Amino acid sequence: MLSYDYIKADRRSILEHAKKLESHVIGDVYDLELNGKHRDDILEYYSEEKITGTLEATDENGQIIIPATKGDKGRIGNLVQEIYFDIPRNNISDYDIEEAKVELKVSKLVNKPRAGLTVKERLVLGMISANESLPERFEESHIYNKCKLMMLIYYINQEDEGKRPYEFPFYRSAYIQVPDSDIEQIRIDYEYIRNCVNSNCYEDLTESRAMYLSPCPKNGRRAFSFKPSYMNQLFREYINTDIMMYDPYTDSNITESASEFDSVIQNSAVLKEKSFEEIVLEKFAPHIGLTVYEIRKSLLTEVDYNAWFTERARRKENTERKIKQKKGLQYDGDIEVNLPGEDKAEEARTTYMMLGIRSNEAEEFVKANICVKSLHINKKGVINEKMVFPAFEFTELLNETWEESQCYQDMYESRFLFAIYKETDDGYVFKGVKFWSMSKDDMEIMHQGWEDIRSIIKEGVKFKLAQKKDGSYNKTTRGQYVVVNNFPDSKNTKANCPDTLLRQERPLNPILSIRPHTSQVYYDLKSINYRDTTNPRFNGSKLPNGDIMTKQSFWYNIDYIKTQILEFL
């Protein structure tokens, strides 16, 4: 049974109180109030209807008599704070639990098929006012106090499993402190935000300019927050591995590092002299103009280079034999059936190698959500890579606001590091790198494309089975029908598109498009009485009318990316 009892001035008692939630669900906290203090205003504010929302009600003629209401899942954190920890939801003190100087946060996890439990949202620390100057020194700010020691309570959003918010289970509770190695970068992030605010440049604030502590959009304003990528890495490295960052029983910090990735910077003190971007660009500079072979030869030992070179040649020759076999041509030697093909991530690994990174990611890039993308430009000037973003659920897309949407966060507020390789007769040559983020003007163009996609989903996605010119149906290699839809593409947005069902009046957005996220198609389309459900259900996403189609994701149109790297072409 849950209770209200704990000692606010005792950090040990706070931890023990929080840990008791781990065997309960969200609704149990509401029941504590229902069967305990029973404050009517509290029960009303946190009722399940207010958090979940309600469906519209219609009469026998289909007329709406009670409109639908939108739920507010943000109240889950306040429910835990106000009921279970007895802290008012509009608390304005320096710390949520002032007596122990502890900040209290409730954070949502989602369970992704491949990644497992993942932090989904930013950790908001406080609003940024456009009308109030920020302290010159980070240590004098209220944000510094808030992030010194936080009690994090995690719960798992299980909407995908058909559960309602009151059924979401609590997962884990733990103290979190910002690691010493991150403090200098967070100070730099604070100084960027402070300079914008104090120089009357509030509108210029953007998350892409910050590494860990970012000015996220919130209710039409900006707020101090730790990026989801930053909080997710702390969760993976410490919380989910049961490594304590702070021990209240000994009042000591745990300095053990649990990083799964190599770091670009070994000593954060260097950030006092140079920015992170300057350090990164300096590491790449000596290798510009060299081929992949030359770069690897300069960075690997002779033994490792020879082993890589031999394996690369072996794979290439084996791939060429397979191609000739498929075409019915003669070839020399034997085919190694189980030998992998050519390494498509070879340049990506070379990119990290130039940074001194042995792992497949860099710690700073993961925490800051900096996407490293190796772009191959062939002799014709064509970029061979696709830039695709995480899959989304249609229901989530419709419930988002633009500035707090996943698309806005991934494609506008994120920062990218492009590593450009250009094809020559001697192989691919490294042309250089570029840190890049989208301009505000381009963001507005992308926003219109995002709204167009949402409008099509609300109006009802149209489907049909693809046909050839002779009237026969196109089929996949599995013998299933090919399904097409009316999301904007290069064909259905043309004025002379002959398909009246799929013809799209909305123009093709020059920046953003929507495409299937996976080759594992999944269709359960009652609207045209067609099913292709051989692949696992998680490959599909449900539309408002009940149809289920292959999960989609947003993509950057590659011609747009090409315009961002013209200096390397």
Image (tube, grey):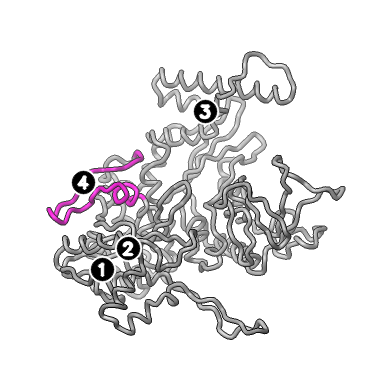
Vertical position of residue 563 compared to residue 11: above or below: above
Q: Which residue is mark 3?
A: 291
* Mark with earlier residue (3, 4): 4
Query: Going 25% across and 55% down the picture, which residue do you hit?
Result: 177
**Residue situated in front as seen by the camera: 390 or 155:** 155
Residue beneath disc 2: 24
The magenta stretch spans residue 154: no
Which residue extends farthest right?
470
Q: Is residue 225 left or right of residue 503?
A: left
Question: What is the spatial separation of the Cα atoms under label 3 and label 4, in whole angstroms?
Answer: 41 Å
In this rendered view, identify the residue nearer to me: 221 or 529.
529
- Which segment did they paint magenta? 233-262
Quadrant in the picture for the C terminus: top right
Please state which amino acid type lies under the numbered disc 4. Thr
Instruction: Find out whether the residues at labels 1 and 3 contact each other: C-beta distance under 8 Å.
Output: no
Tell me how far mark 1 sits from mark 3, CA to CA: 64 Å
* In magenta segment, residue 244: yes
